[in-house]
Image (cartoon, rainbow, N blue to C red):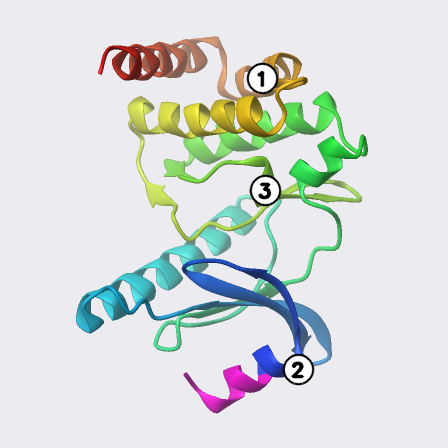
Amino acid sequence: MHPGLKEVIARGRVLARGAESIVVLHEWFGLDAVYKIRLPREYRHPDLDSRLRRNRTRREARTLVRLADAGLPVPTLYEADVEECLVVTEYVPGPSLRDALEEGEAGPEHVEELGRIAASLHGMGIVHNDLTTSNVIVADDGPVLIDLGMSFDSGDPKDHAIDLRVFERCLESSHPSLSDELWRAFLRGYEEEAGEKRTETVLRELERIKSQVRYV
């Protein structure tokens, strides 16, 4: 790791530390910024590990630019260093959607807007691949989508349905008392953006996924 990144970790405020990366709030040319640094995984072969981390860094940076250019709510990309597996973005203040729902600071209207965002993503042929309430920030002007490192390009309704299944399961496990209401809100927003025909196609694939799981 570059010495400068070690200093960022040492002097910044750690926002999250996961199996794959560390996320730190630190200054970037006078601006509050989020540094996401993908860490080596010792259990993987070094060449494979390096390739995976670089590919995910490159993918996240490119997806952020594409979504921002399309006017979708994502943090502004400040810097990407593929060799260092680093992505630096705008700091978006606010709680995660998960925390905001638990504290009563967000409701179905936020999830409905997220449904519209997800449909826009799928309309561009992009799959988030980790669509949960933890990967959404509730900013002053609405939900902001984060953590796009696992995203990939696909126009296949089956892949879009996987995004929906991940989100549905997130609601069931993290927000059980609100899950039905929030799921209906999400689908309202999704259909408003995607249209009835595309939504029905994705929902058919979603039901196939759920039926396959039941009978495995």
**Left or right of 33, for residue 103:** right
21 is higher (above) or lower (below) than 123: below
Q: Nearer the viewer, mark 1 or mark 2?
A: 2
Circle 2 — which element? helix
Q: Which residues are magenta?
A: 1-7
Which badge, 1 or 2, comes first in the chain's sequence? 2
Q: Nearer the viewer, residue 174 or 132?
A: 174
Locate residue 140: give its quadrant: top right
58 is higher (above) or lower (below) than 10: above
Residue drawn 73% across the image and 32% down it: 102
The answer to whether any part of residue 67 appears in the image is: yes
Q: Nearer the viewer, residue 79 or 178?
A: 178
Circle 1 — which element? helix
**Left or right of 142, for residue 176:** left
Residue 86 is one of the magenta-drawn residues: no
State the CA–CA distance, disc 3 to disc 1: 16 Å
Amino acid type, mark 1: Trp
Q: Position of residue 187 (x, y in %)?
A: 55, 16
State the CA–CA distance, disc 3 to disc 2: 25 Å
Q: Position of residue 129 (x, y in %)?
A: 40, 39
Q: Residue 11 shows which numbered tag?
A: 2
Q: Residue 134 shows which numbered tag?
A: 3
The answer to whether any part of residue 72 appears in the image is: no
Residue drawn 29% across the image and 17% down it: 213
Which badge, 3 or 2, comes first in the chain's sequence? 2
Q: Residue 132 shows which numbered tag?
A: none
State the CA–CA distance, disc 1 to disc 2: 40 Å
Say which residue label 1 marks: 183
Q: Position of residue 103 (x, y in %)?
A: 79, 35
Which badge, 3 or 1, comes first in the chain's sequence? 3
